[in-house]
Image (cartoon, rainbow, N blue to C red):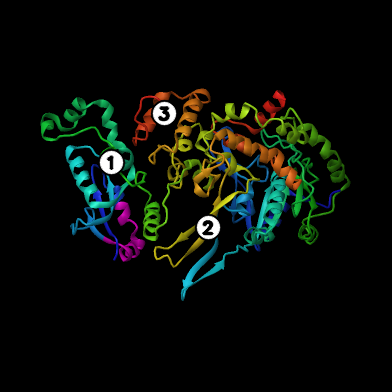
Protein backbone atom coordinates (compact mmCIF):
# COMPACT_ATOMS: atom_id res chain seq x y z
CA UNK A 1 0.00 0.00 0.00
CA UNK A 2 1.25 3.46 -0.85
CA UNK A 3 2.16 5.66 2.13
CA UNK A 4 -0.43 8.35 2.82
CA UNK A 5 0.96 11.86 2.69
CA UNK A 6 -0.51 15.16 3.87
CA UNK A 7 0.70 18.73 3.55
CA UNK A 8 -0.54 21.39 6.01
CA UNK A 9 -0.02 25.13 6.26
CA UNK A 10 0.06 27.34 9.35
CA UNK A 11 1.04 31.03 9.37
CA UNK A 12 3.09 31.47 6.21
CA UNK A 13 2.95 32.43 2.56
CA UNK A 14 2.53 28.72 1.72
CA UNK A 15 5.45 29.08 -0.66
CA UNK A 16 6.90 25.77 0.58
CA UNK A 17 3.65 23.97 -0.28
CA UNK A 18 3.81 25.64 -3.67
CA UNK A 19 7.41 24.45 -4.05
CA UNK A 20 6.02 20.89 -4.01
CA UNK A 21 3.67 21.76 -6.88
CA UNK A 22 6.65 23.35 -8.64
CA UNK A 23 8.24 19.89 -8.90
CA UNK A 24 6.09 19.72 -12.03
CA UNK A 25 8.00 17.09 -14.06
CA UNK A 26 8.45 14.89 -10.98
CA UNK A 27 4.87 15.13 -9.69
CA UNK A 28 3.63 12.06 -11.55
CA UNK A 29 6.53 10.00 -10.14
CA UNK A 30 5.70 11.23 -6.65
CA UNK A 31 2.01 10.47 -7.08
CA UNK A 32 2.99 7.01 -8.31
CA UNK A 33 4.86 6.35 -5.09
CA UNK A 34 2.61 7.96 -2.47
CA UNK A 35 -1.04 8.81 -1.96
CA UNK A 36 -1.72 12.43 -1.07
CA UNK A 37 -4.73 12.60 1.23
CA UNK A 38 -4.65 16.15 2.52
CA UNK A 39 -3.09 19.18 0.80
CA UNK A 40 -4.65 22.58 1.38
CA UNK A 41 -2.74 24.19 -1.47
CA UNK A 42 -3.66 21.44 -3.94
CA UNK A 43 -6.89 19.56 -3.19
CA UNK A 44 -9.94 18.85 -0.98
CA UNK A 45 -9.04 16.81 2.13
CA UNK A 46 -9.72 13.08 1.79
CA UNK A 47 -8.51 11.38 4.94
CA UNK A 48 -6.92 11.96 8.34
CA UNK A 49 -5.08 8.64 8.35
CA UNK A 50 -1.59 9.97 7.62
CA UNK A 51 1.80 8.24 7.44
CA UNK A 52 3.88 11.25 6.51
CA UNK A 53 2.75 14.80 7.32
CA UNK A 54 4.46 17.98 6.18
CA UNK A 55 3.80 21.34 7.81
CA UNK A 56 4.82 24.72 6.49
CA UNK A 57 4.31 27.92 8.45
CA UNK A 58 4.95 29.07 11.99
CA UNK A 59 2.72 28.85 15.05
CA UNK A 60 1.52 32.44 15.36
CA UNK A 61 -2.08 32.20 16.62
CA UNK A 62 -3.89 30.05 19.22
CA UNK A 63 -5.64 28.43 16.28
CA UNK A 64 -2.33 27.40 14.70
CA UNK A 65 -1.43 25.74 17.96
CA UNK A 66 -4.70 23.80 18.13
CA UNK A 67 -4.45 22.72 14.50
CA UNK A 68 -0.85 21.61 14.94
CA UNK A 69 -1.74 19.42 17.93
CA UNK A 70 -4.44 17.74 15.82
CA UNK A 71 -1.97 17.28 12.94
CA UNK A 72 0.62 15.70 15.22
CA UNK A 73 -2.00 13.31 16.57
CA UNK A 74 -2.83 12.07 13.07
CA UNK A 75 0.66 11.87 11.52
CA UNK A 76 2.99 8.94 12.13
CA UNK A 77 5.95 11.02 10.92
CA UNK A 78 5.86 14.82 11.08
CA UNK A 79 8.15 17.01 8.99
CA UNK A 80 8.65 20.77 9.31
CA UNK A 81 9.19 22.36 5.90
CA UNK A 82 10.58 25.84 5.33
CA UNK A 83 12.04 28.56 7.54
CA UNK A 84 8.70 29.39 9.21
CA UNK A 85 8.03 25.86 10.43
CA UNK A 86 11.69 25.14 11.26
CA UNK A 87 12.76 28.46 12.80
CA UNK A 88 9.64 30.59 13.08
CA UNK A 89 10.68 32.45 9.96
CA UNK A 90 10.01 36.10 9.22
CA UNK A 91 6.90 35.87 11.41
CA UNK A 92 9.23 36.08 14.41
CA UNK A 93 10.19 39.65 13.47
CA UNK A 94 7.15 40.78 15.43
CA UNK A 95 8.25 39.05 18.65
CA UNK A 96 10.71 41.62 20.04
CA UNK A 97 8.17 44.42 19.48
CA UNK A 98 5.71 43.02 22.00
CA UNK A 99 2.11 41.98 21.46
CA UNK A 100 0.68 45.28 22.74
CA UNK A 101 2.57 47.00 19.98
CA UNK A 102 2.21 44.73 16.95
CA UNK A 103 -1.44 43.68 17.38
CA UNK A 104 -2.90 47.24 17.24
CA UNK A 105 -0.34 48.18 14.55
CA UNK A 106 -1.68 45.45 12.24
CA UNK A 107 -5.33 45.17 13.24
CA UNK A 108 -6.06 48.67 14.63
CA UNK A 109 -9.09 48.94 16.92
CA UNK A 110 -10.25 45.46 15.78
CA UNK A 111 -7.20 43.76 17.36
CA UNK A 112 -9.26 41.97 20.00
CA UNK A 113 -10.96 39.93 17.25
CA UNK A 114 -7.63 38.62 15.98
CA UNK A 115 -5.95 36.63 18.74
CA UNK A 116 -2.23 36.38 18.02
CA UNK A 117 0.79 35.07 19.90
CA UNK A 118 4.54 35.39 19.52
CA UNK A 119 5.57 33.37 16.46
CA UNK A 120 7.46 30.15 17.07
CA UNK A 121 8.71 27.12 15.17
CA UNK A 122 6.44 24.08 15.24
CA UNK A 123 9.01 22.21 17.33
CA UNK A 124 8.13 24.60 20.19
CA UNK A 125 4.67 23.02 20.32
CA UNK A 126 5.00 19.41 19.17
CA UNK A 127 7.69 16.79 18.55
CA UNK A 128 9.07 17.06 15.02
CA UNK A 129 10.74 14.11 13.31
CA UNK A 130 12.52 15.90 10.46
CA UNK A 131 13.21 19.45 9.32
CA UNK A 132 13.62 20.65 5.74
CA UNK A 133 14.65 24.28 6.22
CA UNK A 134 14.99 27.23 3.84
CA UNK A 135 12.90 30.11 2.55
CA UNK A 136 11.42 28.49 0.62
CA UNK A 137 12.46 24.91 1.35
CA UNK A 138 14.70 23.43 -1.33
CA UNK A 139 12.44 21.30 -3.49
CA UNK A 140 15.28 18.99 -4.55
CA UNK A 141 15.96 18.34 -0.87
CA UNK A 142 12.26 17.56 -0.37
CA UNK A 143 12.50 15.02 -3.18
CA UNK A 144 15.65 13.49 -1.71
CA UNK A 145 13.88 13.27 1.65
CA UNK A 146 10.85 11.48 0.15
CA UNK A 147 13.20 9.07 -1.66
CA UNK A 148 15.08 8.29 1.55
CA UNK A 149 11.87 7.67 3.50
CA UNK A 150 10.41 5.45 0.78
CA UNK A 151 13.60 3.41 0.49
CA UNK A 152 14.08 3.22 4.27
CA UNK A 153 17.39 5.05 4.09
CA UNK A 154 18.62 7.55 6.68
CA UNK A 155 17.98 11.17 5.75
CA UNK A 156 20.47 13.76 6.97
CA UNK A 157 20.71 17.48 6.37
CA UNK A 158 24.11 18.76 5.25
CA UNK A 159 26.23 19.65 8.29
CA UNK A 160 28.37 22.05 6.28
CA UNK A 161 28.25 25.80 5.73
CA UNK A 162 26.89 27.51 2.61
CA UNK A 163 30.53 28.37 1.70
CA UNK A 164 31.00 24.79 0.49
CA UNK A 165 28.37 25.13 -2.21
CA UNK A 166 29.39 28.72 -2.95
CA UNK A 167 32.98 27.60 -3.61
CA UNK A 168 31.82 24.64 -5.71
CA UNK A 169 29.86 27.14 -7.81
CA UNK A 170 33.08 29.08 -8.37
CA UNK A 171 31.73 32.33 -6.93
CA UNK A 172 33.85 35.26 -5.85
CA UNK A 173 33.44 35.41 -2.06
CA UNK A 174 31.23 38.34 -1.07
CA UNK A 175 33.69 39.18 1.73
CA UNK A 176 36.14 40.16 -1.03
CA UNK A 177 33.58 42.79 -2.03
CA UNK A 178 33.35 43.99 1.56
CA UNK A 179 29.98 42.31 2.18
CA UNK A 180 29.45 40.49 5.47
CA UNK A 181 27.63 37.36 4.31
CA UNK A 182 26.18 34.80 6.74
CA UNK A 183 27.32 31.90 4.52
CA UNK A 184 30.06 30.70 6.91
CA UNK A 185 27.56 30.08 9.72
CA UNK A 186 24.54 28.92 7.71
CA UNK A 187 23.56 25.35 6.89
CA UNK A 188 24.19 24.40 3.26
CA UNK A 189 21.77 22.61 0.97
CA UNK A 190 20.49 25.61 -0.99
CA UNK A 191 23.31 25.43 -3.59
CA UNK A 192 24.31 28.88 -2.30
CA UNK A 193 21.59 30.38 -4.44
CA UNK A 194 21.71 33.89 -2.89
CA UNK A 195 25.49 34.50 -3.08
CA UNK A 196 25.52 32.94 -6.56
CA UNK A 197 23.11 35.64 -7.67
CA UNK A 198 24.95 38.38 -5.80
CA UNK A 199 22.97 38.65 -2.53
CA UNK A 200 24.49 37.90 0.84
CA UNK A 201 23.28 34.81 2.71
CA UNK A 202 20.71 35.66 5.38
CA UNK A 203 20.68 32.29 7.15
CA UNK A 204 17.20 31.16 6.09
CA UNK A 205 18.30 27.54 6.56
CA UNK A 206 19.39 28.19 10.12
CA UNK A 207 22.74 28.17 11.84
CA UNK A 208 24.93 25.20 10.94
CA UNK A 209 26.57 24.81 14.36
CA UNK A 210 27.12 26.53 17.67
CA UNK A 211 30.88 26.44 16.97
CA UNK A 212 30.44 28.41 13.74
CA UNK A 213 28.34 30.98 15.61
CA UNK A 214 31.08 31.32 18.24
CA UNK A 215 33.66 31.87 15.50
CA UNK A 216 31.40 34.55 13.98
CA UNK A 217 31.19 36.33 17.29
CA UNK A 218 34.99 36.48 17.47
CA UNK A 219 35.68 37.24 13.81
CA UNK A 220 33.10 39.90 13.20
CA UNK A 221 34.34 41.90 16.16
CA UNK A 222 38.06 41.23 15.76
CA UNK A 223 38.48 41.03 12.00
CA UNK A 224 35.68 43.17 10.58
CA UNK A 225 34.36 46.56 11.43
CA UNK A 226 30.82 45.28 11.79
CA UNK A 227 28.45 46.18 14.54
CA UNK A 228 27.08 43.16 16.32
CA UNK A 229 23.62 44.71 16.13
CA UNK A 230 23.71 44.51 12.32
CA UNK A 231 24.70 40.86 12.39
CA UNK A 232 22.02 40.03 14.92
CA UNK A 233 19.45 41.87 12.83
CA UNK A 234 20.43 39.74 9.82
CA UNK A 235 20.31 36.59 11.91
CA UNK A 236 16.84 37.48 13.16
CA UNK A 237 15.33 37.95 9.70
CA UNK A 238 14.37 34.29 9.33
CA UNK A 239 14.42 33.49 13.02
CA UNK A 240 17.82 31.78 12.86
CA UNK A 241 18.82 33.44 16.12
CA UNK A 242 16.40 34.87 18.65
CA UNK A 243 18.80 35.92 21.40
CA UNK A 244 20.10 39.44 21.71
CA UNK A 245 23.68 38.23 22.10
CA UNK A 246 25.99 35.87 20.26
CA UNK A 247 27.72 33.06 22.15
CA UNK B 1 67.46 26.96 -23.38
CA UNK B 2 64.56 28.40 -25.29
CA UNK B 3 62.95 26.25 -27.95
CA UNK B 4 60.85 28.85 -29.77
CA UNK B 5 59.51 32.40 -29.46
CA UNK B 6 56.20 33.94 -30.38
CA UNK B 7 54.58 37.38 -30.19
CA UNK B 8 51.47 37.96 -28.09
CA UNK B 9 49.25 38.29 -31.18
CA UNK B 10 50.85 35.23 -32.78
CA UNK B 11 50.22 33.27 -29.60
CA UNK B 12 46.56 34.26 -29.48
CA UNK B 13 46.14 33.18 -33.12
CA UNK B 14 47.71 29.82 -32.29
CA UNK B 15 45.43 29.36 -29.30
CA UNK B 16 42.46 30.28 -31.47
CA UNK B 17 43.50 27.50 -33.88
CA UNK B 18 43.89 25.09 -31.01
CA UNK B 19 40.26 25.92 -30.24
CA UNK B 20 39.22 24.08 -33.41
CA UNK B 21 40.17 20.78 -31.82
CA UNK B 22 40.11 21.58 -28.11
CA UNK B 23 37.78 23.26 -25.64
CA UNK B 24 39.65 26.43 -24.65
CA UNK B 25 39.97 27.20 -20.95
CA UNK B 26 41.95 30.08 -19.60
CA UNK B 27 42.04 33.23 -17.48
CA UNK B 28 39.15 35.61 -18.08
CA UNK B 29 38.82 39.01 -16.43
CA UNK B 30 35.56 39.74 -14.63
CA UNK B 31 34.88 43.31 -13.63
CA UNK B 32 34.20 43.64 -9.90
CA UNK B 33 33.80 47.39 -9.23
CA UNK B 34 33.60 46.83 -5.46
CA UNK B 35 37.10 45.37 -5.36
CA UNK B 36 40.55 46.88 -5.50
CA UNK B 37 41.77 46.31 -8.19
CA UNK B 38 38.26 46.28 -9.71
CA UNK B 39 38.80 43.02 -11.56
CA UNK B 40 39.20 39.33 -10.69
CA UNK B 41 40.33 36.52 -12.95
CA UNK B 42 38.77 33.09 -13.29
CA UNK B 43 39.66 30.07 -15.40
CA UNK B 44 36.69 29.54 -17.61
CA UNK B 45 35.73 28.14 -20.97
CA UNK B 46 35.98 30.59 -23.87
CA UNK B 47 34.99 30.41 -27.52
CA UNK B 48 37.80 32.66 -28.71
CA UNK B 49 41.38 33.24 -27.65
CA UNK B 50 40.71 37.00 -27.64
CA UNK B 51 38.55 36.56 -24.52
CA UNK B 52 41.60 35.44 -22.56
CA UNK B 53 43.65 37.84 -20.49
CA UNK B 54 47.12 36.31 -20.53
CA UNK B 55 48.60 39.15 -18.49
CA UNK B 56 46.34 38.18 -15.56
CA UNK B 57 47.66 38.41 -12.03
CA UNK B 58 46.15 35.29 -10.44
CA UNK B 59 42.93 33.31 -10.77
CA UNK B 60 40.65 33.16 -7.73
CA UNK B 61 40.27 29.40 -8.21
CA UNK B 62 42.87 26.99 -9.52
CA UNK B 63 42.30 25.12 -12.80
CA UNK B 64 41.80 21.91 -10.76
CA UNK B 65 38.06 21.81 -11.51
CA UNK B 66 38.73 21.03 -15.18
CA UNK B 67 40.57 17.83 -14.25
CA UNK B 68 38.70 16.97 -11.06
CA UNK B 69 35.29 18.69 -11.06
CA UNK B 70 33.47 19.70 -7.83
CA UNK B 71 30.80 17.14 -8.69
CA UNK B 72 30.86 14.39 -11.30
CA UNK B 73 28.96 11.24 -12.18
CA UNK B 74 31.22 8.20 -12.03
CA UNK B 75 28.72 5.72 -13.42
CA UNK B 76 25.03 5.23 -14.11
CA UNK B 77 23.34 2.13 -12.76
CA UNK B 78 20.17 0.38 -13.72
CA UNK B 79 18.34 -2.74 -12.58
CA UNK B 80 17.44 -4.95 -15.53
CA UNK B 81 15.88 -8.40 -15.00
CA UNK B 82 16.73 -8.29 -11.29
CA UNK B 83 20.41 -7.48 -11.90
CA UNK B 84 22.18 -4.14 -11.50
CA UNK B 85 24.40 -3.03 -14.36
CA UNK B 86 26.74 -0.07 -14.20
CA UNK B 87 27.94 2.05 -17.10
CA UNK B 88 31.00 4.19 -16.39
CA UNK B 89 31.00 7.85 -17.41
CA UNK B 90 34.32 9.05 -18.80
CA UNK B 91 34.94 12.59 -19.96
CA UNK B 92 37.16 12.45 -23.03
CA UNK B 93 36.59 16.02 -24.20
CA UNK B 94 39.85 17.49 -25.50
CA UNK B 95 40.73 20.60 -23.56
CA UNK B 96 43.51 23.16 -23.71
CA UNK B 97 44.26 24.68 -20.34
CA UNK B 98 45.89 28.01 -21.11
CA UNK B 99 47.75 30.23 -18.67
CA UNK B 100 48.57 27.80 -15.88
CA UNK B 101 51.05 29.37 -13.47
CA UNK B 102 53.96 27.30 -12.06
CA UNK B 103 52.26 26.87 -8.66
CA UNK B 104 49.29 25.21 -10.33
CA UNK B 105 51.58 23.14 -12.56
CA UNK B 106 53.09 21.71 -9.36
CA UNK B 107 49.61 21.14 -7.95
CA UNK B 108 48.52 19.24 -11.09
CA UNK B 109 51.65 17.08 -10.78
CA UNK B 110 50.50 16.11 -7.30
CA UNK B 111 46.98 15.32 -8.54
CA UNK B 112 48.52 13.21 -11.33
CA UNK B 113 50.53 11.30 -8.75
CA UNK B 114 47.63 10.76 -6.35
CA UNK B 115 45.06 9.68 -8.92
CA UNK B 116 47.53 7.32 -10.66
CA UNK B 117 48.67 5.63 -7.47
CA UNK B 118 47.31 2.23 -6.31
CA UNK B 119 44.10 1.69 -8.25
CA UNK B 120 44.40 4.34 -10.98
CA UNK B 121 41.39 6.66 -11.20
CA UNK B 122 40.08 6.25 -14.73
CA UNK B 123 37.83 9.30 -14.49
CA UNK B 124 40.72 11.62 -13.66
CA UNK B 125 42.98 9.86 -16.15
CA UNK B 126 40.45 10.29 -18.98
CA UNK B 127 40.32 14.05 -18.45
CA UNK B 128 44.02 14.43 -17.84
CA UNK B 129 45.11 12.53 -20.94
CA UNK B 130 42.86 14.72 -23.07
CA UNK B 131 44.15 17.99 -21.58
CA UNK B 132 46.89 20.06 -23.21
CA UNK B 133 48.53 22.37 -20.70
CA UNK B 134 50.01 25.69 -21.79
CA UNK B 135 51.71 27.13 -18.73
CA UNK B 136 52.84 30.71 -18.30
CA UNK B 137 55.69 31.58 -16.00
CA UNK B 138 55.41 34.46 -13.52
CA UNK B 139 58.27 36.97 -13.82
CA UNK B 140 57.01 38.66 -10.63
CA UNK B 141 54.72 37.53 -7.78
CA UNK B 142 51.11 37.54 -9.00
CA UNK B 143 49.89 39.34 -5.90
CA UNK B 144 50.97 40.12 -2.37
CA UNK B 145 50.94 37.39 0.26
CA UNK B 146 51.88 34.51 -2.04
CA UNK B 147 54.75 32.33 -0.81
CA UNK B 148 55.44 30.15 -3.85
CA UNK B 149 59.12 31.13 -3.88
CA UNK B 150 59.40 29.84 -0.29
CA UNK B 151 57.72 26.57 -1.27
CA UNK B 152 60.04 26.30 -4.33
CA UNK B 153 57.04 26.15 -6.63
CA UNK B 154 57.34 29.50 -8.41
CA UNK B 155 59.18 27.81 -11.25
CA UNK B 156 58.39 24.55 -13.01
CA UNK B 157 60.50 22.40 -15.30
CA UNK B 158 57.91 19.68 -16.01
CA UNK B 159 54.21 18.94 -15.67
CA UNK B 160 53.16 21.02 -18.69
CA UNK B 161 53.02 20.48 -22.43
CA UNK B 162 54.41 23.94 -23.13
CA UNK B 163 55.78 26.61 -20.80
CA UNK B 164 55.77 30.23 -21.92
CA UNK B 165 58.14 32.82 -20.50
CA UNK B 166 57.07 36.44 -20.92
CA UNK B 167 60.27 38.12 -22.05
CA UNK B 168 61.01 41.81 -21.86
CA UNK B 169 58.69 43.74 -24.13
CA UNK B 170 60.36 44.09 -27.49
CA UNK B 171 60.98 47.38 -29.28
CA UNK B 172 59.21 48.39 -32.48
CA UNK B 173 61.34 46.13 -34.67
CA UNK B 174 60.91 43.19 -32.35
CA UNK B 175 57.20 42.40 -32.18
CA UNK B 176 55.76 45.94 -32.35
CA UNK B 177 56.04 46.60 -28.65
CA UNK B 178 54.04 43.53 -27.59
CA UNK B 179 55.10 40.94 -25.07
CA UNK B 180 57.21 38.23 -26.64
CA UNK B 181 56.94 34.79 -25.18
CA UNK B 182 59.82 32.36 -25.06
CA UNK B 183 58.52 28.79 -25.28
CA UNK B 184 59.84 25.51 -23.92
CA UNK B 185 58.17 22.17 -24.45
CA UNK B 186 57.63 19.61 -21.72
CA UNK B 187 56.05 16.76 -23.68
CA UNK B 188 56.10 15.33 -27.18
CA UNK B 189 52.69 16.93 -27.85
CA UNK B 190 54.13 20.25 -26.73
CA UNK B 191 57.15 19.83 -28.99
CA UNK B 192 54.92 19.16 -31.98
CA UNK B 193 52.84 22.24 -31.24
CA UNK B 194 55.94 24.44 -31.05
CA UNK B 195 57.65 23.08 -34.14
CA UNK B 196 54.72 22.44 -36.51
CA UNK B 197 53.43 26.01 -36.29
CA UNK B 198 55.07 28.75 -38.28
CA UNK B 199 54.07 31.51 -35.91
CA UNK B 200 56.59 30.10 -33.48
CA UNK B 201 60.01 31.18 -34.63
CA UNK B 202 63.56 30.42 -33.60
CA UNK B 203 64.79 32.65 -30.78
CA UNK B 204 66.99 35.56 -31.79
CA UNK B 205 70.26 36.32 -30.03
CA UNK B 206 68.44 39.04 -28.13
CA UNK B 207 65.72 36.57 -27.03
CA UNK B 208 68.39 34.20 -25.74
CA UNK B 209 70.02 37.09 -23.88
CA UNK B 210 66.78 38.11 -22.17
CA UNK B 211 66.00 34.46 -21.33
CA UNK B 212 69.45 34.08 -19.78
CA UNK B 213 68.87 37.11 -17.59
CA UNK B 214 65.30 36.03 -16.78
CA UNK B 215 65.91 33.71 -13.76
CA UNK B 216 68.05 36.25 -11.96
CA UNK B 217 65.59 39.12 -12.47
CA UNK B 218 62.78 36.82 -11.42
CA UNK B 219 64.53 35.60 -8.27
CA UNK B 220 65.10 39.19 -7.22
CA UNK B 221 61.42 40.03 -7.70
CA UNK B 222 60.15 37.35 -5.28
CA UNK B 223 60.34 38.36 -1.64
CA UNK B 224 60.27 35.80 1.16
CA UNK B 225 57.20 35.38 3.32
CA UNK B 226 58.28 32.31 5.25
CA UNK B 227 60.60 32.82 8.21
CA UNK B 228 62.00 29.32 7.82
CA UNK B 229 62.61 27.08 4.81
CA UNK B 230 60.24 24.57 3.24
CA UNK B 231 62.72 21.74 3.95
CA UNK B 232 62.59 22.49 7.66
CA UNK B 233 58.78 22.41 7.89
CA UNK B 234 58.41 18.62 8.40
CA UNK B 235 60.81 18.60 11.36
CA UNK B 236 59.23 21.77 12.70
CA UNK B 237 55.80 20.12 12.61
CA UNK B 238 57.18 17.02 14.33
CA UNK B 239 57.86 19.24 17.32
CA UNK B 240 54.57 21.15 17.11
CA UNK B 241 51.94 18.46 17.60
CA UNK B 242 51.06 19.69 21.08
CA UNK B 243 51.47 23.38 20.33
CA UNK B 244 48.89 25.72 21.82
CA UNK B 245 48.72 27.46 18.44
CA UNK B 246 46.20 24.97 17.04
CA UNK B 247 43.59 25.76 19.66
CA UNK B 248 44.36 29.49 19.70
CA UNK B 249 44.04 29.81 15.91
CA UNK B 250 41.12 27.44 15.45
CA UNK B 251 38.88 29.41 17.78
CA UNK B 252 38.37 31.68 14.78
CA UNK B 253 37.79 28.81 12.34
CA UNK B 254 34.25 28.47 10.98
CA UNK B 255 35.03 24.95 9.71
CA UNK B 256 33.49 26.14 6.44
CA UNK B 257 36.09 24.28 4.36
CA UNK B 258 36.79 27.25 2.07
CA UNK B 259 40.56 26.69 2.41
CA UNK B 260 40.15 23.10 1.19
CA UNK B 261 37.81 24.00 -1.62
CA UNK B 262 40.05 26.64 -3.20
CA UNK B 263 43.24 24.62 -2.65
CA UNK B 264 44.83 23.35 -5.89
CA UNK B 265 46.33 20.31 -4.13
CA UNK B 266 43.30 19.18 -2.09
CA UNK B 267 41.94 16.03 -3.69
CA UNK B 268 39.59 14.51 -1.09
CA UNK B 269 36.15 13.52 -2.21
CA UNK B 270 33.02 11.82 -0.97
CA UNK B 271 30.68 9.57 -2.95
CA UNK B 272 26.90 9.33 -2.94
CA UNK B 273 24.33 7.36 -4.85
CA UNK B 274 21.56 9.44 -6.37
CA UNK B 275 18.60 7.18 -6.96
CA UNK B 276 15.53 7.89 -8.99
CA UNK B 277 12.26 7.70 -7.09
CA UNK B 278 11.71 4.18 -8.45
CA UNK B 279 15.05 2.99 -6.94
CA UNK B 280 15.79 0.89 -10.03
CA UNK B 281 18.23 3.35 -11.57
CA UNK B 282 20.44 6.24 -10.63
CA UNK B 283 23.98 7.58 -10.59
CA UNK B 284 26.97 7.32 -8.33
CA UNK B 285 28.48 10.75 -7.96
CA UNK B 286 31.54 12.08 -6.25
CA UNK B 287 31.88 15.53 -4.80
CA UNK B 288 34.75 17.50 -3.33
CA UNK B 289 35.14 17.00 0.38
CA UNK B 290 37.43 18.81 2.80
CA UNK B 291 39.27 17.85 5.99
CA UNK B 292 38.18 21.08 7.70
CA UNK B 293 34.50 20.18 7.46
CA UNK B 294 33.12 18.95 10.80
CA UNK B 295 31.89 15.58 9.51
CA UNK B 296 34.90 14.75 7.33
CA UNK B 297 36.29 12.18 9.77
CA UNK B 298 33.01 10.57 10.79
CA UNK B 299 33.21 6.81 10.39
CA UNK B 300 30.73 3.95 10.80
CA UNK B 301 29.04 4.05 14.18
CA UNK B 302 29.06 7.86 13.97
CA UNK B 303 32.44 8.21 15.64
CA UNK B 304 34.26 11.39 14.65
CA UNK B 305 37.99 11.03 15.15
CA UNK B 306 38.65 14.74 14.56
CA UNK B 307 35.67 16.44 16.20
CA UNK B 308 37.48 19.69 17.07
CA UNK B 309 38.44 22.50 14.72
CA UNK B 310 41.91 22.61 16.28
CA UNK B 311 42.51 18.94 15.42
CA UNK B 312 41.34 19.56 11.88
CA UNK B 313 43.54 22.64 11.43
CA UNK B 314 46.55 20.68 12.68
CA UNK B 315 45.70 17.81 10.37
CA UNK B 316 45.51 20.09 7.35
CA UNK B 317 48.79 21.81 8.21
CA UNK B 318 50.53 18.44 8.59
CA UNK B 319 49.11 17.29 5.26
CA UNK B 320 50.21 20.41 3.44
CA UNK B 321 53.70 20.83 4.87
CA UNK B 322 54.80 17.35 5.91
CA UNK B 323 52.87 14.20 5.05
CA UNK B 324 52.21 14.77 1.35
CA UNK B 325 55.86 15.73 0.79
CA UNK B 326 57.07 12.68 2.71
CA UNK B 327 54.76 10.31 0.87
CA UNK B 328 55.14 11.63 -2.67
CA UNK B 329 58.21 13.84 -2.75
CA UNK B 330 55.94 16.50 -4.21
CA UNK B 331 54.79 19.81 -2.76
CA UNK B 332 51.67 19.49 -0.57
CA UNK B 333 51.37 23.27 -0.46
CA UNK B 334 52.35 25.34 -3.50
CA UNK B 335 52.23 28.72 -1.77
CA UNK B 336 49.48 30.19 -3.95
CA UNK B 337 47.82 31.64 -0.82
CA UNK B 338 44.33 31.00 -2.17
CA UNK B 339 43.41 29.53 1.23
CA UNK B 340 44.62 32.67 2.98
CA UNK B 341 42.52 34.85 0.68
CA UNK B 342 39.46 32.59 0.96
CA UNK B 343 39.47 32.51 4.76
CA UNK B 344 36.91 35.00 6.04
CA UNK B 345 38.34 34.43 9.53
CA UNK B 346 41.70 35.58 8.13
CA UNK B 347 43.58 32.47 9.22
CA UNK B 348 46.75 32.34 7.14
CA UNK B 349 48.78 29.21 6.35
CA UNK B 350 52.03 31.10 6.04
CA UNK B 351 51.35 32.84 9.35
CA UNK B 352 50.75 29.44 10.98
CA UNK B 353 54.11 28.19 9.64
CA UNK B 354 55.81 31.37 10.84
CA UNK B 355 54.29 31.25 14.30
CA UNK B 356 55.36 27.62 14.69
CA UNK B 357 58.87 28.57 13.59
CA UNK B 358 58.93 31.37 16.14
CA UNK B 359 57.76 29.02 18.91
CA UNK B 360 60.38 26.38 18.15
Q: CA distance from mark 3 to mark 1?
A: 25 Å
Residue matched to label 3: A231
Q: CA distance from mark 2 to mark 1?
A: 35 Å
Residue located 61% across and 34% down the image? B340
Badge 1 marks a residue whose secondary structure is helix
Q: Which residues are magenta?
A: A18-35
**Looking at the image, which is closer to me, A106 or B266?**
B266
Whichever of callouts 3 and 1 sits on the residue coming sooner in the sequence is 1
Q: Which mark is drawn over residue B136? A: none
Q: Residues within 10 Å of mark 3 (few under 14, many from 20)?
A: some
* For residue A186, above or below residue B188: above
Given the image, what chain letter belongs to the residue carrying mark 2? B
Residue matched to label 1: A122
Question: In the image, B179: left or right of B311?
Answer: right
Given the image, what chain letter belongs to the residue carrying mark 1? A
Q: Position of residue B254 (x, y in %)?
A: 51, 34
Q: Position of residue B345 (x, y in %)?
A: 54, 31
Residue matched to label 2: B285
Amino acid sequence: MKPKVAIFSLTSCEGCSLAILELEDRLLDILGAVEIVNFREGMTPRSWDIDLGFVDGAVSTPEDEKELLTIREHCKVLVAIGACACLGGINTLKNPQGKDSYAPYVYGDQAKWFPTTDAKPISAVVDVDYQLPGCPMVKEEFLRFVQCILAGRTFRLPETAVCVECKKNGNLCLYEKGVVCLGPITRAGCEAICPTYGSKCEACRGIVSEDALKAANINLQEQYDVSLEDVLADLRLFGAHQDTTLP
Amino acid sequence: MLDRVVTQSGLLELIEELGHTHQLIGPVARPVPECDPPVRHFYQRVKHAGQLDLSFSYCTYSPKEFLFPPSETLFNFEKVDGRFTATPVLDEQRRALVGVHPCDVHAIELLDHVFAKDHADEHYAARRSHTFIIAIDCPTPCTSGVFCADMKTNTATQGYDVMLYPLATGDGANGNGQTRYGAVFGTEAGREWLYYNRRFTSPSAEDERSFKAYPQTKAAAFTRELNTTVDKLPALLDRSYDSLLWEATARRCYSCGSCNLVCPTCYCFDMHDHNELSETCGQRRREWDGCQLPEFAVVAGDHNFRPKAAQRLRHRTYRKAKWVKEQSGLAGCVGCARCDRACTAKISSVEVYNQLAEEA
